[in-house]
Amino acid sequence: MSDLTEISLDQLPWLSKTWRDWVGLAHNDKVPSAILVAGQSGVGKNRLTSEYAKFLLCEQAKRLERPCGDCRSCKLIEAGTHPDLQWVAPEDGAKAIKIDQVRGLGDFIYAKPQISRRRICVLTPAEAMNAYSANAILKTLEEPPASVVILLVSQQISLLLPTIRSRCQIYTLAAPDRESVVNWLTQLDVPKERAYSLTESAGGRPLTALAWHSQDILELRAEVLADWLNYLEGRVDAFTLAETWSKLDLERLADWLAIWLKQLLTATQIGEGEGSETEATLAGVGARLDTQQLVSLYAELIEIKRSLVEQRNLNPQLMLESWLLANKRVRKRRK
């Protein structure tokens, strides 16, 4: 099974404690007016949040642990026509949540619920709000109506205004440990060896690993690593490689490079990897690289990742060329 739409919340065990906590809040009428769900991509933030929005609107929620799926509210949500549920996300082709979207949300929030006890707003990803829309939502968070619950989802909570964070109950979703991810994938009929490779490739993010199972991601990842190592050895020029990489998913590329840089740093310090084929390959290269320059290169990559998350207007090829040229510093000088 590799279709994420076929995976139920019950099949995501690392989310079970948070779900139980949230159900308890609903049963005891203690749901916060604003909940901020934080965590890296691929751990199930949107899946958990959308299920909770459905649960809060379900007519049978008081006596159940899950949305019933049969009441009027549940059926309207499935049809995408529930009048008391609104999603706010970047519009088609846009990178940011604009102020007009947040202003429109105000009309929704301050109106009375039509068929449910509550009105629910889901805003994702929260870091996509620009300065104007962030300030606009802040006013709503300060004095929300008693019948409203605002659910914000964020991959980069540090990019949100401190005043927004302070007005929310924050839940941080962490990925399970790597061995648990491998076991989870094998239970979904992923061969164990491939499960290990997928888990490493996805940085331990279970839903990302599963999504990549049916794609040629592992093969692409191997090509990218080979190209980068060839570049470090002087066999490929920066401009050609930057042009090739600029056509890839840049966030995924940055994630891979960050993982490999960490492994290279480990190799420069202890001279060996932790056992995977990739780590063994990097260990052979790491001994010939300068540790301090690797740290600097990693910091520059983190800034690139931040720029991607903030969705700044970037020229991908120029950005990659600049970073690759900085790679030249990492080779140790011969004495």
Image (cartoon, rainbow, N blue to C red):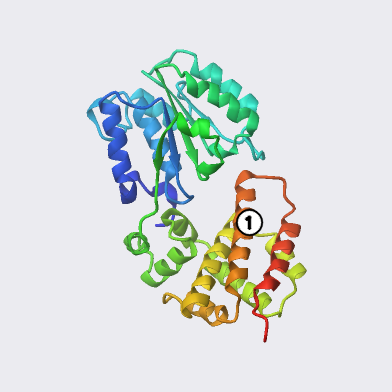
Q: Is residue 36 above or below residue 174?
A: above
Residue in view at x 45 percent, y 21 percent: 84
Q: Is residue 295 above or below residue 282?
A: above
Q: Is residue 93 above or below residue 279?
A: above
Q: Secondary structure at mark 1?
A: helix
The reply, left or right, for residue 34 in relation to residue 253 is left
Q: Residue lying at the far front in this picture: please name it.
A: 335
Q: Position of residue 183 (x, y in %)?
A: 32, 63
Residue in view at x 42 percent, y 42 percent: 47
| Image quadrant assignment for residue 118 | top left
Q: Which residue is mark 1?
A: 250
The reply, left or right, for residue 11 in relation to residue 123 is left
**Quadrant occupied by the N terminus:** bottom left
Q: Position of residue 124 (x, y in %)?
A: 52, 37
Can the viewer see residue 12 in this picture? no
Q: Residue lying at the far bottom in this picture: please name it.
A: 335
Amino acid under disc 1: Leu
| Image quadrant assignment for residue 199 | bottom left
Residue in view at x 59 percent, y 72 percent: 225
Can the viewer see residue 190 in this picture? yes
